[in-house]
């Protein structure tokens, strides 16, 4: 198969020693690159939250904002998930973290700094705990992966019905999302350590974990803010 086609064939978590491309690296280096990639995402989010007034983002027409957000995230996820080129995967990762930063900007300004820091601390502890569990019990998270996906779709459907039809929201939905994304952190961490250890795979794995962690943080922030 031509390299150009092979480079876009396999999803990052479906890669094996047989179909993976790129030079293999040590486990320590692999984890370091994942950590630095996650740090870059959170750093960019911090820059956006600190330097862009939320009024500027809120002034964008909702349809324009949503369309731009959706296109950027979908294209970004496709790039880091399908590409075997580390540079292309990193570009895709940035297409995800920037619009997520705008969402976080709109969300964080509603709460005082104490609540935000509290949510960051809880998210960090929950993430670390689920990574440990994902390392020790990868088979368990593999078995519940389908359940997590179905549960997330159900929660989204229930939330849309609440908002559109009943014009209300229930806090139990936020708790459900927290549990689901805690599961996804453990699941994606376990998958990240099963695939070949290359620079591109480290970036793709970190990108998947970033999405899990940001969603987890957003829900924990809502729960703490409600209290």
Image (spheres, rainbow, N blue to C red):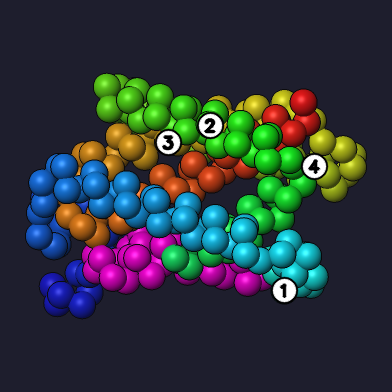
Tell me which segment is drawn in magenta. Answer: 67-93
Spot occupied by residue 85 in the image (x, y as percentages of width and height): 24, 68
Which disc is residue 185 wearing?
3
Magenta highlight on residue 181: no
Residue 155 vertical placement versus 94 (above, below): above
**Residue 159 image position (x, y, % from top left):** 74, 40
- For marks 1 and 4, the one nearer the N-term is 1
Q: CA distance from mark 2 to mark 1?
A: 33 Å
Q: Residue at x 54, y 61 (%)?
A: 47
**Figure check: 109 above or below 74:** above
Of badges 1 and 4, nearer the viewer stands: 1
Residue 145 at x, y percent in the picture: 42, 33
Q: What crowding class fits label 3: few (fewer than 14 Cα within 10 Å), some (14-19), or many (20 or more)? A: many
Residue 93 in view here:
yes
Q: Element at badge 3?
A: helix
Q: Residues within 10 Å of mark 1 (few under 14, many from 20)?
A: few
Give residue 161's mark. Answer: 4
Q: Which residue is mark 1?
A: 64
State the separation of the CA atoms marked 3 and 1.
Answer: 31 Å
Q: Which mark is residue 121?
A: 2
Asked if the residue under mark 3 is in contact with the one under mark 4, i.e. CB atoms within 8 Å, the reply is no
User: Sequence-wise, which precedes: disc 4 or disc 2?
Assistant: 2
Labels 4, 2: front one: 2
Q: CA distance from mark 1 to mark 4?
A: 23 Å
Please indicate whether residue 78 sits to the left or right of residue 174 in the image: left
Seen at 41% across and 45% down, the residue is 209
Residue 194: % across, % down: 21, 39
Characterize the magenta stretch by its predominant secondary structure: helix
Q: Secondary structure at mark 4?
A: helix
Q: Nearer the viewer, mark 2 or mark 1?
A: 2
């Amino acid at each position: 198969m031509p390299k150009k086609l092979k480079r876009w064939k396999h999803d990052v978590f479906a890669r094996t020693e047989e179909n993976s491309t790129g030079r293999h690296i040590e486990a320590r280096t692999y984890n370091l690159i994942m950590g630095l990639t996650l740090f870059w995402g959170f750093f960019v989010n911090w820059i956006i939250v600190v330097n862009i007034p939320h009024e500027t983002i809120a002034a964008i027409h909702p349809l324009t904002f949503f369309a731009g957000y959706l296109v950027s995230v979908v294209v970004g996820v496709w790039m880091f998930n399908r590409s075997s080129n580390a540079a292309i995967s990193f570009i895709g990762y940035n297409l995800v973290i920037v619009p997520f930063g705008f969402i976080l900007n709109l969300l964080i300004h509603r709460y005082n700094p104490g609540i935000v820091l509290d949510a960051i601390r809880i998210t960090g502890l929950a993430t670390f705990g689920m990574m440990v569990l994902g390392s020790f019990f990868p088979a368990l998270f593999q078995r519940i992966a389908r359940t997590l996906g179905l549960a997330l779709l159900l929660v989204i459907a229930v939330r849309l019905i609440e908002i559109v039809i009943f014009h209300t929201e229930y806090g139990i939905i936020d708790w459900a999302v927290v549990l689901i994304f805690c599961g996804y952190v453990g699941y994606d961490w376990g998958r990240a350590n099963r695939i070949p250890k290359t620079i591109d795979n480290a970036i793709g794995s970190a990108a998947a974990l970033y999405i899990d962690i940001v969603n987890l943080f957003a829900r924990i922030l809502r729960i703490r803010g409600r209290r």
